[in-house]
C-alpha cells in the first residue's frame, strides 16, 4: 500500500511550520512520527497533498520539571516518555501509559504530541493526560494559547486545534505521591485497547480517563465525584460508563465495553487506593 | 526529491518520490531485499530495520524521513561471512522455521538488547511484541535472544 502522491516540506521550527501550513491550508498536514498519519495515508483514508515534516524540530523534544508541573515537548517520542526519570518521579502514570503504546518500534517513532493532536479515542495518551488534568500549549500565527485537556477533544479525531495551529507542549501536573494504575484490555499484544483505563487517586481526589469508550477520550467525572463523596471503589466503578458513549465494533459490543470499563476502573482504582 | 541516506555504512544519493516508503527504497532502489514486507500495516514487524541504531518499522517511515540519517538492514550484520552473535543465536536455538519474520526479528532483538542488555524472559517477550512469527510459537526466538544476551555478557567479561 502506497500513499497517494503529495509534496513534502521539512520545517526547522514551529514558526516555520505554522507559516507553511498557512501557505498550503487545508490540503496540508503536519507529519511528526507518522505512526498515526502514515497508516491512514497508506489506506488512502487521508490524502493530504502537502506534508509538512515537523519531526526534525528538535527543540520541541524535552521533558522538564517546571515547578508545579512537568513540561513535555510535543515531539518527545513515546520511548523517551516511557524511560524518563523526571516522569517516573512526578508523573509515573504517564510514563507507564506510554509503555503500552504500540510496540518498541512504534514507540521509537511516535510522539506524544502527534498522538494527542490526532485525538484518537482509542489511543492511550489522550485519555491518560485527560485523567491527569493536563494542559496543552498550542502555537498559531498570533502566538500561543493554552487549552485544558478536558476542552481539547471535541469529536472523533477532532480537536480544538485550529488548522493553522501546532501543539508545542503538554503540561502535566505533578502527581505528588498519588497512587496510580493503567489498565489496557486488548486481544493482540501491540494493538489498541478495546477498553483502557488511566487512573490516579490521592485520598478523596482522583482522576479516571477512559480509552476507546466513545468518540473522544472520556474523563469519567462521575467516578471521581463518587470517590470524593466517599463511595467504595466497587460502587464508584459502577459509574464507569456514566460519562461515556461506547460504540460497537468487531472487537466488542456496547454492553461488553461497559462491562470492561467497570471491571477495569475497579481494578485501576483498587491498585491506586 | 533528492535524499542522501547512509545505509549499511554506504552513503547513497537518491531521487525518490516523497511517498516512497523506506522499505521500498531499501528493497527496490538499493536492492537490499533482506528486509521483508509482511503485513504492510505496521503490525507484523517483518520490515524492521534500524534507523539511527533503533528498530523501526520501515513500512511506516517515508524514505524522505531518513534523509541525512543512518539506516542499517539485516545485510549489515555479517562481516566477512561471520554472522552477528544474534544470527548465530537464532541458528543455534532454532529461532526460525520459514524465515520470513527472521530479518525483522533479528533487527528488533538487537535493538532490544542495545536498550536492555540483560532482559528477563518476560522483557524479551514484551520487547518483541511488535514482531509476529507464525511458525515457531516464539519459544525458540525468546530462547535465542536470551542466549545472545548471555553470550554477550560472557564475552563482555573478558
Image: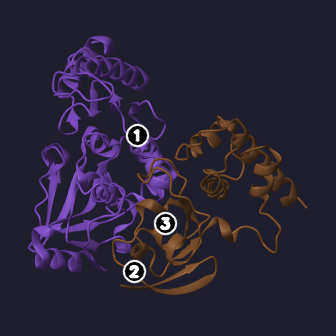
Chain colours: A purple, B brown
A67 vs A227, nearest the viewer: A227
Q: Quick check: can you spot residue A66? A: no
Residue A2 screen position, x and y as percent: 34, 63
Residue B55 lies, with reference to residue A194, above or below; the image says below
Chain letter of the residue beneath label 2 in the structure image: B
Q: Is residue A36 left or right of residue B148?
A: left
- Look at the numbered disc 2 and give the secondary structure of its residue: loop
Per the model, the C-alpha gap separating discs 2 and 1 is 42 Å
Percent coordinates x, y for residue B136 in the rendering? 67, 37
Q: Nearer the viewer, residue B7 or B19?
A: B19
The numbered disc on residue B16 is: 2
Label disc, if present, on residue A93 of the rendered structure: 1
- Residue topped by disc 3: B23
Q: Which is more toward the observer, A205 or B43?
A: B43
Whether labels 3 and 1 belong to a single chain: the reply is no
Question: Would residue A83 appear left or right of A53 to someone viewing this image?
Answer: right
Cβ–Cβ under 8 Å for marks 2 and 1: no
Label 1 crowd (10 A; few <14 / some 14-19 / many >=20) = many
Q: Quadrant of the N terminus of chain A?
A: bottom left
The residue mark sitting in front, 3 or 1, is 3
Q: What is the x, y in percent for residue A98?
A: 42, 46
Report if the CB atoms under discs 3 and 1 are less than 8 Å apart: no
| A58 to the left or right of A49 | right
**Dot 3: element:** helix
The residue positioned farthest toward the right in the image shown: B158
Alpha carbon of mark 3 to alpha carbon of mark 2: how far?
A: 12 Å
Amino acid at each position: 500500500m502506497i500513499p497517494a502522491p503529495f509534496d513534502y516540506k521539512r520545517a526547522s521550527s514551529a514558526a516555520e511550520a505554522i507559516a507553511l501550513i498557512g501557505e498550503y491550508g487545508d490540503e496540508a498536514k503536519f507529519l511528526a512520527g507518522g505512526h498515526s498519519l502514515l497508516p491512514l495515508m497508506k489506506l488512502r483514508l487521508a490524502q493530504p497533498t502537502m506534508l509538512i515534516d515537523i519531526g526534525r524540530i528538535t527543540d520541541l523534544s524535552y521533558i522538564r520539571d517546571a515547578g508545579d508541573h512537568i513540561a513535555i515537548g510535543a515531539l518527545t517520542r513515546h520511548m523517551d516518555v516511557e524511560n524518563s526519570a523526571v516522569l517516573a518521579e512526578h508523573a509515573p502514570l504517564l510514563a507507564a501509559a506510554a509503555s503500552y503504546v504500540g510496540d518498541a518500534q512504534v514507540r521509537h517513532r511516535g510522539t506524544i504530541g502527534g498522538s494527542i493532536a490526532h485525538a484518537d479515542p482509542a489511543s492511550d495518551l489522550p485519555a491518560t493526560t485527560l485523567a491527569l488534568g493536563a494542559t496543552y500549549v498550542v502555537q498559531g500565527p498570533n502566538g500561543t494559547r493554552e487549552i485544558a485537556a478536558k476542552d481539547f477533544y471535541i469529536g472523533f479525531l477532532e480537536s480544538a486545534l485550529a488548522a493553522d495551529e501546532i501543539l508545542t507542549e503538554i503540561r502535566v501536573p505533578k502527581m505528588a505521591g498519588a497512587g496510580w494504575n493503567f489498565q489496557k484490555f486488548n486481544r493482540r499484544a501491540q494493538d489498541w485497547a478495546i477498553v483502557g483505563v488511566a487512573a490516579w487517586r490521592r485520598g478523596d481526589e482522583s482522576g479516571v480517563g477512559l480509552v476507546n469508550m466513545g468518540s473522544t477520550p472520556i474523563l469519567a467525572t462521575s467516578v471521581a465525584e463518587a470517590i470524593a463523596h466517599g463511595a467504595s471503589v466497587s460502587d464508584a466503578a459502577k459509574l464507569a460508563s456514566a460519562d461515556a458513549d461506547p460504540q460497537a465494533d468487531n472487537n466488542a459490543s456496547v454492553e461488553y465495553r461497559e462491562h470492561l470499563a467497570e471491571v477495569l476502573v475497579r481494578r485501576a482504582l483498587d491498585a491506586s487506593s | 526529491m533528492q535524499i542522501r541516506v547512509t545505509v549499511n555504512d554506504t552513503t547513497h544519493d537518491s531521487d525518490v518520490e516523497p511517498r516512497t516508503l523506506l522499505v521500498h527504497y531499501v528493497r527496490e532502489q538499493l536492492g537490499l531485499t533482506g528486509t521483508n514486507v509482511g503485513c504492510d500495516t505496521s503490525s507484523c514487524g517483518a520490515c524492521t530495520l534500524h534507523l539511527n541504531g533503533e528498530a523501526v518499522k520501515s513500512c511506516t517511515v517515508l524514505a524522505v524521513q531518513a534523509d541525512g540519517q543512518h539506516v542499517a538492514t539485516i545485510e549489515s550484520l555479517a562481516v566477512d561471512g561471520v554472522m552477528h552473535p544474534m544470527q548465530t543465536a537464532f541458528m543455534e536455538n532454532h529461532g526460525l522455521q520459514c524465515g520470513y519474520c527472521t530479518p525483522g526479528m533479528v533487527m528488533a532483538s538487537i535493538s532490544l538488547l542495545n536498550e536492555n542488555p540483560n532482559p528477563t524472559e518476560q522483557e524479551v517477550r514484551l520487547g518483541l511484541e511488535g514482531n509476529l512469527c507464525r511458525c515457531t510459537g516464539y519459544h525458540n526466538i525468546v530462547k535465542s535472544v536470551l542466549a545472545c544476551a548471555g553470550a554477550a555478557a560472557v564475552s563482555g567479561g573478558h
